[in-house]
Structures are given as structure tokens and as C-alpha cells.
Image (spheres, rainbow, N blue to C red):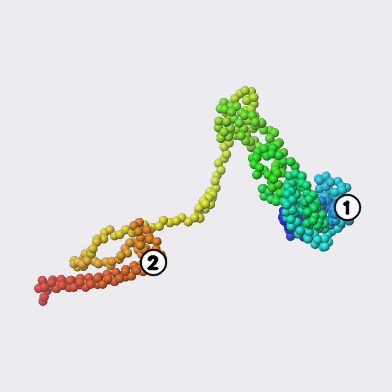
Amino acid sequence: MACSGCSTGRGNGTPAGCKSNGACGIGGCNKLNIFDWLANMELPNGQKQFDIVEVRFKNSRKEFYRNNSGQDLFQGDIVAVEGNPGHDIGAVSLSGELVKTQMKKLNIPYDSAEVKSLYRKAKTADIDKWQATIAREVDTMYKARVIASGIGLDMKLSDVEFQGDGSKATFFYTAPDRVDFRELIKKLAEEFRVRIEMRQIGQRQEAARLGGIGSCGRELCCSTWLRDFRTVNTSAARYQQLALNPLKLAGQCGKLKCCLNYELDSYLDAIKEFPENDKPIETQKGLAVHMKTDIFRRTMWYAYKDNMGLFIPLSVDRVKELQAMNAQGIKPDELAAIVTKLPAKKEPDYENVVGQDSLTRFDRTKKKSNNNKRKPGNKNRVAGPNPVQNTDGGDKGPEIKPENKNQGGNNQNRGPRDNNNRPHAITATAHLGMIATARQETTVTVRRATITTARHVITTTATVGQNRRKTHLRHPKNNK
């Protein structure tokens, strides 16, 4: 495929491309490349190799040269050829018997004056000078654009190419009309001190020279294999039932895409069997007009004028039958729609096993907070001290439980709250201090409860002893 270092650029003397240095046999690194499938085949006895070779220069420019010296030339060799004036440097893109086919395809006779002489293989000095001239091309093009805009010429300089010996520079430009560039040539010659040649090209030729990627994702046809540019009309899009959208039908050159002509003949052959669609069909329900056509399915869609949103598909034979009935003055009851029952597709069982259809399957769901819930208190507990029955039948007295100010269940040590049980916005340091204070108060309360419980046990023991003494005095029989 073409790139800036292979087809757009001209390399540095070593054939560019893959690791085989451009000699891989397919030569996919060049514009308008041709696969030489006769390269490894021997010629019949007594037959000499064809003495004309094809030489590639910058971008898509290719010319034919005669190998008068009879040197063995192969694809990728850097050669010095005849220039005007001086000599030029290029790379051999094709040699052998396939050159005859290319010359016949381009209508170039064998003894044509366009076929110039090939001098020799390029030397190291020739390649070094060639590289120096290539390095000047970008700056030269920018400066030339500034000069052309200063003069006020309605033209676009798209590319510049120096000859191999650096004696001539060819400027390629596009313009809507003829341009008087005599003053421009004088200024360019004064600026660059070389011979100037201006060559006007079309927009399609410009796209072929610069290259690019089409809307199909492949490299442009005009920069890879297409040489002849045929006229493309909007009728080609109509025959193929394409929407007349200029943005989709136009290529990078701004013209209609050349690929619209590739399948046009097949569509024209298929449309011959279709009836005319400009005549409406009269029925008892009303007048039906043609809406669209599917050439591959041989189906035509019609719609009633009073209900243009409902498309009724009809076969080609059915449309011919209805048109024949209208020609005889017969109006059918209705348009017979094609009812096609497609077999139900069985969905696979593994379609949504892991939830691949859900876009939020990896999102974490927020858990509801239980801040507003409180643990229910002991409803059976009676306020105040509860009497405890003694195993001996006496009362132990009131049971004293330790007081705890923080008996709120889950709300314990969670800081101050408002009427709606929501925490106030306080700092973390203040909250920690409040927790420490609550712990200290709880400890003091537990100590007080322990002391009170101990006093209650002592009092209960003394009361039980007094009761025993009274019982002993009441029963004198026990005093023996």
C-alpha cells in the first residue's frame, strides 16, 4: 500500500517497502503498480528480452524508456534516463514482456517519439544529487504558493517535482479557468534559479498524484490501478437506487466517485425486466403510486395517495398484471401485498447469560442507610426499681441497674442530631472528642451503679439476719 516513504516519496536510492527492500514481487509500495507474473519465467530459445522498460518517478508519473545498452534491469533498480534538458533519475517499475501489454493498453506504439533513451544505472553521485533536489521540493512549493497568491492568480499549486539533475522544476496546479502565469514563471525562475515548467491537471489527476484513503477504507483507485477517468453522471446513482446526497457520492477530488460506474452495467441489465414506474396504478380503493424498488429482490413498493405512509410490496409480475388491467380499463379491488412469513429465529440460550446486554451491569448499587431505624426498647420493663423475689420467699429489694445516657441502640456515640434524626455537619475532631466524653460518662455511671449494688447487698443480708433472730425467739422449743 502507498505511504509517504514509498509511493508518495521517491526513497533514497534503496527501494522502499517491506524488509525485502521493494523486491518482494508484488511491489505493493508503489502507485499504479503491476504484478510481474512473468518475472521468473524463461524466454524461449533464441528470443531476446523486450528492450523497453517502465520507469517510475514521483507519485503516479510513469514513462517508458528504451534500453539501448542491453543492461540487465530488474524491478527497483535506480537508473538515469534522458531528460529535457539534462537527465532524470527514476526507479524501474516493470520490465520484460508485460511492458508490451502496458504500451498496447495506453496506445503507445513501439517506435513512438515518447519512448526516450535509458542511459545507465545511477551512480552514487547521481543518487546523492537526486536526494538533495528532493529535499528542496517542500520548501519550494510553499514559497511558490506565497508568490502565486501575491500576484492574485486563481490557481492551486498541488505538487512540485524536481528533475534528477536539479536543472528543472515542474509545478502541477489546478484552476477553474485558463491562467496567465507568465509573470509567475519569471518570479519563480528568479527565486529558485532553475528552469520552470507549469503543468495544469484536473482534480482527479490531483487526487491520483497525492493519494489518500477513500470512504470504503481502501486506498484510492486512481492512485493504485485506475488510469482512465471516465465520465460519471448522477444517472448512475439513480439506476442503482442510491440517495442523491452530494456528500456521499463525491470523492476526495470533489467529483462523483469513479466506483459508481463499476456495477452500473449489471444494474442496467437487471432493470430491463422491470416495468415502468412512472405510471400510477388505479384500484377501487384509490390511486397507488410507486415509492421505491429493490432490484435484487425483484420487489416494487407502492402506496395509496391517501395513505402515503403505508408501503405495499408487489412483485414484478404482479405490477405488470395490474398495469395490463388498467390498460384494459379494469380497476382491481386492491393491491395484493406479498405476505412472506419468515421462519422464527431461535434465540440462543447463552444470549444474556452474563448480562452482556446490560450497560449498567458493572455499576454498584447504593445500599439504603439504616440511620433512621432504631432498635425497639424492652416494652415489658417497668419504670423504676423492680422487686426481685427471693428464693426463701422474701424480697431482695429493688433491682438497681446502671444508668446509661446513651441507650439509643444504633444511635450510640454518633454525635448530635436534629429533629429529623440527621447528624449535624461537624468536624471529625469534634466528633471524636464527643465520643471520648461519652465513654468517660459511661464509666463513671457504671462505677456508681456498682457501689449502689454493693450497698443493697449488705442491707439485704442484715435484714435476713434480723428475720432469723425473730423467728428463733418466737419458737422457744428450739432453745434447748
Mark 1 or mark 2, which is nearer to you? 2
Instruction: Identify whether 237 is placed above or below 92.
Output: above
Name the residue rendered at 10%, 76% in the picture.
Answer: 480
Q: Quadrant of residue 445?
A: bottom left
Between 268 and 233, the one nearer to me in the picture: 233
Instruction: Identify whether 154 is placed above or below 318.
Output: below
Identify the amino acid type marked 1.
Lys
Between 213 and 48, the one nearer to me in the picture: 213
Q: Quadrant of residue 165?
A: bottom right
For the residues bearing labels 1 and 2, Cβ distance under 8 angstroms: no
Between 476 and 200, the one nearer to me in the picture: 200
Residue at far left of view: 476
Q: Which residue is mark 1?
A: 48
Callout 1: SS = loop
| Residue 274 at x, y percent in the picture | 67, 33
Q: Which residue is mark 2?
A: 430
Name the residue rendered at 36%, 63% in the picture.
Answer: 415
Q: Earlier in the sequence, mark 1 or mark 2?
A: 1
Q: Is residue 466 visible?
A: yes
Name the residue rendered at 74%, 53% in the picture.
Answer: 147
Instruction: Identify whether 67 is placed above or below 290.
Output: below
| Residue 308 at x, y percent in the picture | 57, 33
| Residue 321 at x, y percent in the picture | 63, 28
Identify the amino acid type marked 2.
Ala
